[in-house]
Each structure stands twice: as structure tokens, then as C-alpha cells.
Amino acid sequence: MTYLAKLDTIIRDIIEPSAIAIDRDGAFPRTAIRALGEAGLLGLTSATEVGGMGLGLAEASQAVERIGQACPSTAMVVTMHFSATAVIEKFGAETLRRDIAAGRHLTTLAWSEGGSRSHFWAPVGTAVRDGDSYLLDGAKTMVTSALEADSYIWSSRPAQVDGASTLWLVDSKTAGLTQLNPFDGMGLRGNCSAPLVSKSMRLPLSAMLGADGGGFDIMIGVVLPVFSTLIASNSIGIMETAINRSIAHVSGNKFEHLNSSLADFPTIRAYIARAKIRADMARMLRDETLVALGSGHPDAMLRVMEVKAAAAESALEVTDIAMRVCGGAAFRKDVGVERCFRDARAASIMAPTSDVLYDFIGKAICGLPVFG
């Protein structure tokens, strides 16, 4: 059975039927994540040498897009897991890599801080050498799967060298790590985001991922392409669902006195056409980004920055259109459009935000240092 066949079965039997309750209750999709793990799909990007599927970002993007059509909260959990797995595959121990490949370990990123906001590459939390270990102090503002993940890819200032950041592998049960109240927000309600605080959190030397001070290069070179492409894929999945639900509504409802459906009105069709164009443009840019990354094209990192902003902003427009064309019915939970509308809001404000990316893109195309 192909990975997509396995995935579609889990989506049909578990993810889609539970999506409404996950959103309503703000519940973490444990059953879905367990099923994805047992099917080997949490190890989709893990190397075959450690028991993973050995697939790449293109396949991960297809998986996240499909999951996002059914439950964007679950798709976000998977996005962050694959993003963190990219670091572990490059710098982590073989035993941990095997656990991820076997679906026994869920990981995530812990980067965003109040002191540096959407500039995720510049943490203010500290790491201090203490004999044969390090003591970490800091606070993360919002960590996906914070109360559920087995590990975090944690960022801090470098311990002993110059540089922007250092990355660490942190077990979720490490002493000195406090998990605060879970997120109770407007959208992506099931991704179990929460702040994390570390106070004199002691880590062994082996917990450092890469070199001290080398976090920036890992964040930008290893993680950002994965994260940007996958969160864009989630936005594409949300758009696809919003459009399909809008089509179902306008095709199935009539003006009885005119004996015509809502879809018979040119204005409504034009709105849906605009939504479809925006969604298709985002998907095409996502696919172009995958090609550029795969071929090592000089503009690959420009595409990486563009795709997150383009898909996030397109999702805002598409779900706005869906709310408009479905009218009052769009406010009903059972129609499902308002959930798409709420979930779509997250991508544009997740670091790097759309506004930050616009600045980065402008710098890049003007020949200026992007992070200067």
C-alpha cells in the first residue's frame, strides 16, 4: 500500500470524522497522531536506514495538504513534527531517529519568544556551561504540541561563542521545564499550543544539535524550507475545502421564486472563480518551490519565503470569499466554512509572519542582506 493510500484511509476513518469535535473542544488529535505513527507516516521523511519511508518534502507536502483539507489542526501538528524531524535526521542520535521512524516519538519546534517576536532566529533565552552540562533559561511564547510532544527542538543564545543561536534537543519531561496553560484560541484549536518556560534546565553536552552558535544556519538552511512549504500546504488544503464547501452550498440552495440555484448568479460564480484562481496560484508556487529546492536553483530560498506568504494571504482571501458567498449559512458550524475561515488566520501570523516575509523578499530582490 502506498503512503497516500495509508494516509487517505486514516483521513477517512479517523481524521475527518473527529475534526469537528477537535475544533469544538480544543482537543489534541491523539487518535489520529497515534494512527499516523502506527502506519509509519510520522516517519515519512525519516531515512530508510533507520526504518523510515525515506521520502522527501514533496511527499510530505502532499500529506499535509490532504490532512489540512480534513483537519488543519492535525496538519499543523504534523507540519511541526516534520520540521523538527529534519533537524533530528541531520544531527540526532540513531536511537531517536529510529523511534521517530517507527512512530513512537512526536517532536516539535520551540523557537518563538516574546523578546524577539517573529524574528525566530534571534532567541533571547540563555545557555550557560556548567561543568559537563549546560543550564538553559528562557521562555517560549507558543509551541505547537507543547503538552503532547515527546521532545522539542529548543533555541537559545550561544553558550560560549559568538552567533545568533544554538539548538538543543529537549526531552519534554526534563526537570526545570514548565508547560503552562494550553492555547484556547480562535483557530487551529486542536494543535495544543502552549507557552513553555525553562528555569535552570540542565542538559547534557549531547543535547546540543550542531555546533554552538550554529543554530541560525540550521534554522534557515534546514528547517525554513520544510516549515514554509508545509505550512503553505496546510493553507492550500484549507482553501480547497473552503472552495468545495462553497460550491456545495451555492449549488444546493435555491431561490424558489426564481427556480434557480445560487450558482446560477454570475456574481457568485465570479467570486468562486477568484477563490479557485488564488488557490491554484498558491499550489503552483508551492510546486515550483519544491522543484527549485530539489534542483538547487539559485532562487530556491526566495521561493521558500514567497510560498508561505503567498499561501497564507491567499487563504485569507479565499476563506473571506467563502464566507461571503455562503452568506448567513457560513456562520453555522455544520456548514464548515467558518472553521476554514478561523483556521486560515494562523499561517499569516506564524513566524516569520507575512509582513516580515514581505520585507525579506523585498530585500532579496533589491540585492540587500535579508537578515541584516
Image (cartoon, rainbow, N blue to C red):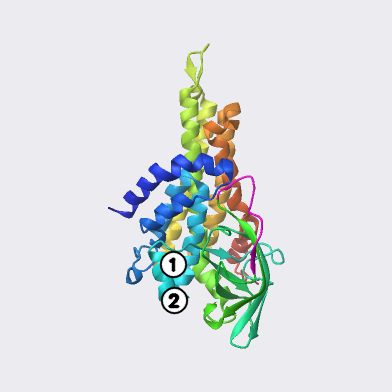
Residue 201 sits in quarter: bottom right
Which residue appears farthest toward the top when viewing the image? 257
Which residue is label 2 attached to? 93
Does residue 106 show up? yes
Which type of secondary structure does the marked residue at label 2 adopt? loop
**Residue 347 in magenta?**
no
Q: What is the magenta segment's predominant secondary structure?
A: loop
Residue 243 image position (x, y, % from top left): 49, 37
Give the Cα separation between the discs numbered 1 and 2. 31 Å
Q: Residue at 42% of width from left, 63% of height from top?
A: 104
Which type of secondary structure does the marked residue at label 1 adopt? loop
**Residue 179 in magenta?**
yes
Which residue is label 1 attached to? 297
User: In the image, is 63 to the left or to the right of 181?
Assistant: left
Residue 328 image position (x, y, % from top left): 60, 27
Q: Amino acid at mark 1?
A: His
Location of the C terminus by quadrant is bottom right
User: In the image, is 225 to the left or to the right of 365?
Assistant: left
Residue 337 sits in quarter: top right
Depth check: give the residue in front, 121 or 17.
Answer: 17
Residue 242 image position (x, y, % from top left): 51, 38
The boundaries of the magenta stretch are 177-190
Q: Residue at 56% of width from left, 40% of height from top?
A: 339
Residue 310 image position (x, y, % from top left): 55, 52
Which residue appears farthest toward the right when viewing the image? 115
Q: Amino acid at mark 2?
A: Ala
